[in-house]
């Protein structure tokens, strides 16, 4: 679906933003593109969506070279949720969606009100201007805008930004439903929980280079210390002990009266983010 080979890009001669990026996103895959601010995430996404030209290397979407001229039909296959909601603030949610829907064939469109209802948008605000919306409400309209055309490829930049926990769970469920329909999702985010729960594979980008690319599970397993943390009771005291996993093969290797809990000391995806990018999450 998306193929990138030796992708380079420079904003000026002495500032190369991307250094020979190579990766492929399969049909129906949720692919996470993760990195700190200034690492090249947004530049890459702008190239993939046709906003930026003049890059080096090869980039194709739907088997078509992104450096060539594309028809309106090509862009009608793409849905984009930008990090900062791109909406007309003097228009209502419905009027915004009606306007953006005008760029697509009628038979391709979803019903705007049904989509907003699915996104749990507050009905009382359907016809009120965007200026009266909270950040979470604007994010719901922006997601509706990205989904209104039933895109084959969905580019999502920080999709759960501005949402409360229940809203984030809702968005993750909707993104997963899109994948089940066969939609390919290119996800950029700082939210490692979103990436861990949603992505089939993730790429960590740092200073314009891909530092690692694999499934979240494999990345964590490859970097696991294989330690086990055990909470237990012994002689009236609650204690904690950390041992190596192989020590458990013959049972608990120390005196105890009761085992309270056993946890693996597997690294988190946030740990992997810091390891591969050299920077923490803001």
Image (cartoon, rainbow, N blue to C red):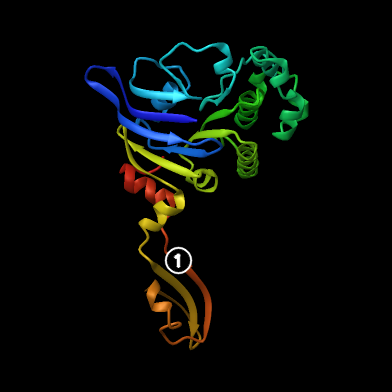
Q: Quadrant of residue 244?
A: bottom left
Image quadrant for the C terminus? top left
Front residue of 69/142: it is 69
Q: Residue drawn at (75%, 19%), measured in percent from left and top?
A: 127
The residue tagged 1 is 264
The answer to whether residue 199 is left or right of residue 123 is left
158 lies above or below 11: below
Q: Residue drawn at (40%, 42%), measured in percent from left and top?
A: 281
* Farthest residue, direction left: 14
Front residue of 37/194: it is 194
Q: Residue drawn at (49%, 79%), measured in percent from left and top?
A: 232
On the image, the x and y values in percent for residue 43 come to: 39, 24
The answer to whether residue 74 is left or right of residue 120 is left
The answer to whether residue 245 is left or right of residue 263 is left
On the image, the x and y values in percent for residue 271 come to: 39, 51
Counting every numbered tag in the picture gives 1
The answer to whether residue 181 is left or right of residue 193 is right
Mark 1 lies on a secondary structure that is strand
Q: Quadrant of residue 211?
A: top left
What is the crowding at mark 1: few (fewer than 14 residues within 10 Å), some, or many (at least 20)? some
On the image, the x and y values in percent for residue 108 come to: 69, 21
54 lies above or below 113: above
Q: Quadrant of residue 242?
A: bottom left
Q: Residue drawn at (54%, 48%), measured in percent from left and top?
A: 197
On the image, the x and y values in percent for residue 140 come to: 64, 30
Front residue of 152/257: it is 152
């Amino acid at each position: 679906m998306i193929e990138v080979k030796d992708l380079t890009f420079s904003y000026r001669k002495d500032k190369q933003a991307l250094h020979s990026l190579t990766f492929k996103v399969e049909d129906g895959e949720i692919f996470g593109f993760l990195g700190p601010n200034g690492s090249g995430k947004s530049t890459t996404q702008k190239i993939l969506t046709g906003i930026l030209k003049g890059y080096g290397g090869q980039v194709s979407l739907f088997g078509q070279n992104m450096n060539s001229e594309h028809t309106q039909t090509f862009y009608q296959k793409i849905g984009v949720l930008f990090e900062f909601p791109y909406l007309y603030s003097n228009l209502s949610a419905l009027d915004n969606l009606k306007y953006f829907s005008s760029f697509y064939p009628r038979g391709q469109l979803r019903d705007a009100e049904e989509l907003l209802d699915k996104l749990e948008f507050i009905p009382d605000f359907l016809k009120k201007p965007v200026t009266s919306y909270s950040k979470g409400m604007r994010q719901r309209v922006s997601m509706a805008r990205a989904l209104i055309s039933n895109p084959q490829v969905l580019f999502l930049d920080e999709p759960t930004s501005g949402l409360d926990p229940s809203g984030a769970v809702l968005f993750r469920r909707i993104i997963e439903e899109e994948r089940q329909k066969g939609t390919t999702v290119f996800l950029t985010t700082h939210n490692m929980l979103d990436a861990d729960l949603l992505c089939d594979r993730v790429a960590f980008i740092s200073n314009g280079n891909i530092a690692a690319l694999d499934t979240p599970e494999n990345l964590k397993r490859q970097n696991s210390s294989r330690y086990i943390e055990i909470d237990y009771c012994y002689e009236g005291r609650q204690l904690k002990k950390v041992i190596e996993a192989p020590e458990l093969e013959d049972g608990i290797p120390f005196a105890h009266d009761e085992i309270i809990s056993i946890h693996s000391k597997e690294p988190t995806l946030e740990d992997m983010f810091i390891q591969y990018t050299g920077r923490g999450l803001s």
